[in-house]
Image (cartoon, rainbow, N blue to C red):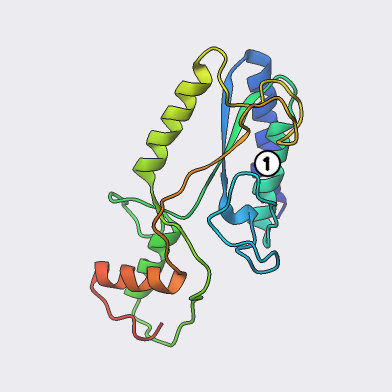
């Protein structure tokens, strides 16, 4: 837990302070794990940037802490970009993303019964699309009078100066974890009837 907090909160705060000191722009990559998936809140994805965060695990809590830390730095031109589950076409290892971890588990020899949820909606998004949108966000941040980034407000999204502080990037295609496992099984050519 301490290493997770050090990485996602403390180092992010340090980075935001340094960016403010040198006048650099900062895009903080966060996650939809800052939300509960509807478990307690009844609020289901897709989420709007102003949706109320409610993380249910340490990772989500630490990423939300990082968001708050980055946006709290006076003089930092920072924006939080929340992304969902990612996938890519050219991974070298099936452990490189959450969606591919499912494919990896399907390829293991064990066919013991496995349970995954069939209610939580996910929006797997291609890494290439994320990188293109991040480039567009940075281009906008570099323009004079840009609408993106904290711009030195020294507060998080509650500041009312009209600047965009949080952006959600996501595919429009959705599926449950069960449906994602079935898709991965088809792609890697294995049976998923035990799921």
Quadrant location, the C terminus: bottom left
Instruction: Write down the quadrant of residue 182 in the picture.
Output: bottom left
Above or below for 121 versus 154: below
Mark 1 Cα shell of 10 Å, populated few (<14), some (14-19), many (≥20): many
Q: Nearer the viewer, residue 123 or 160?
A: 160
Q: Is residue 71 visible?
A: yes
Residue drawn at 72 percent across, 39 percent down: 68
Above or below for 19 versus 14: above
Residue drawn at 41 percent across, 59 percent down: 95
Residue drawn at 54 percent across, 12 percent down: 144
Q: Residue furthest left?
A: 189
Left or right: residue 139 versus residue 56 is left
Q: Secondary structure at mark 1?
A: helix
Above or below for 69 versus 126: above
Residue drawn at 25 percent across, 67 percent down: 187
Report the residue marked by disc 1.
Answer: 66
Instruction: Write down the quadrant of residue 50 in the picture.
Output: top right
Quadrant location, the N terminus: bottom right
């Amino acid at each position: 837990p301490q290493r997770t907090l050090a990485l996602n909160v403390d180092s992010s705060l340090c980075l935001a302070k340094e960016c403010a000191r040198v006048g650099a722009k900062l895009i903080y990559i966060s996650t939809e794990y800052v939300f509960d998936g509807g478990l307690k809140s009844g609020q289901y994805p897709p989420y709007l940037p102003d949706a109320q965060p409610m993380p249910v695990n340490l990772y989500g809590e630490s990423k939300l802490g990082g968001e708050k830390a980055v946006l709290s730095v006076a003089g930092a031109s920072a924006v939080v970009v929340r992304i969902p589950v990612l996938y890519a076409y050219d991974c070298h290892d099936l452990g490189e993303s959450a969606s591919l971890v499912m494919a990896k588990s399907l390829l293991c020899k064990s066919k013991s019964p496995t349970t995954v949820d069939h209610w939580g909606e996910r929006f797997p998004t291609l890494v290439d699309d994320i990188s293109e949108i991040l480039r567009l966000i940075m281009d906008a941040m570099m323009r004079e009078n840009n609408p993106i980034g904290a711009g030195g407000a020294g507060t998080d999204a509650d500041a009312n100066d009209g600047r965009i502080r949080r952006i959600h990037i996501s595919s429009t295609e959705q599926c449950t974890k069960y449906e994602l496992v079935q898709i991965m099984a088809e792609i890697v050519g294995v049976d998923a009837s035990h799921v």
